[in-house]
Amino acid sequence: MAQIFHPSFNTLSRVSIFGAVFFLGAAVWGWDRLLRSPYNTQVNVAREQPVPFSHKHHVAGLGIDCRFCHTSVEESAFAGIPPTKTCMGCHSLVWKDAPMLEKIRESYRTDAPVEWVRVHDLPDFAYFDHSIHVSKGIGCTTCHGQVDEMPLTWRENTLNMDWCLSCHRDPEVFVRDRADVFSTEWRPDDVSAEERAELAERYHLESMTNCSVCHR
């Protein structure tokens, strides 16, 4: 029987198969890069807010403690978005007529909350409790970055599962004394390996990578 395909088709088929595998791998790699890119994770992307609130001004400039606004962070799963009356506690006296704060004053007059844009927003299938992390000696800046240097707030970390697991596998690396949890001046080098081990034992830290810890 006569040969149907020219011998060159053997080479063409090999090239096609290799090319398909290569392009499939490139597509998977590109998709992974997209999922981890700032476009998707919003890492280092400052979020526009209804009112341009500056952590840099309030924290570094005025020395206001995190807990002054985020009142429930030590006791509940949610850190708490401050109500308008917290803002007006100061701004009824300071910058009380500033145009940029009109939405704050309007919210206070009408009792309608300001629609702040969530910067750190985990998906509904992931459980997170601020209070347990605070009680275990995990500081604000470990997850949120140096908020005292942010004129507008951005996400410092991806909040992806692999990022969470990097701490859950070995939390001793990130522990600090509870007295320093809300300090923005604390740095990892402030604690020696021996002190970390002592703190880990005192706070009963352990590796927690079971799925049910975060997915309940």
Image (cartoon, rainbow, N blue to C red):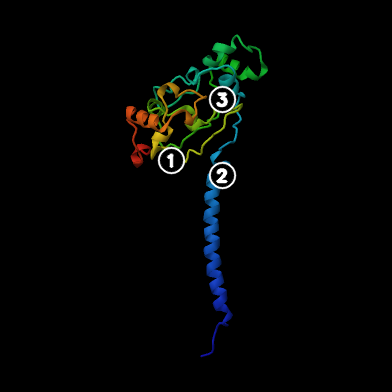
The residue that label 1 is drawn on is 166
Residue 16, image x and y in percent? 55, 70
Q: Residues within 10 Å of mark 1 (few under 14, many from 20)?
A: few
Residue 85 percent location from the top left of the image: 52, 14
- Viewer-closest of 109 and 169: 169
Q: Secondary structure at mark 1?
A: helix
Q: Are marks 2 and 1 in contact (CB under 8 Å)?
A: no
Query: Considering the numbered disc 3 on the image, is that residue within a helix, a strand or a loop?
Result: helix
- Image coordinates for residue 145, horizontal then vertical, percent: 52, 31
The residue positioned 55% from the left and 49% from the top of the image is 33
| 3D distance between C-alphas at marks 3 and 2 | 24 Å
Q: Which mark is residue 37?
A: 2
Q: In front: 209, or 170?
A: 170
Task: Report which quarter residue 37 is drawn in.
Answer: top right
How would you rate the neighbour count of disc 2 (Cα within 10 Å): few for under 14, some for 14-19, many for 20 or more? few
Label 1 to label 3: alpha-carbon separation: 24 Å
Name the residue beneath numbered marker 3. 148
Q: Residue at x 54, y 19 (%)?
A: 112
SS class of the residue under badge 2? Answer: loop
Q: Amino acid at mark 3?
A: Asp
**Residue 166 found in image quarter:** top left
The three-letter code of the residue at mark 1 reads Ser
Q: Quadrant of residue 138?
A: top left
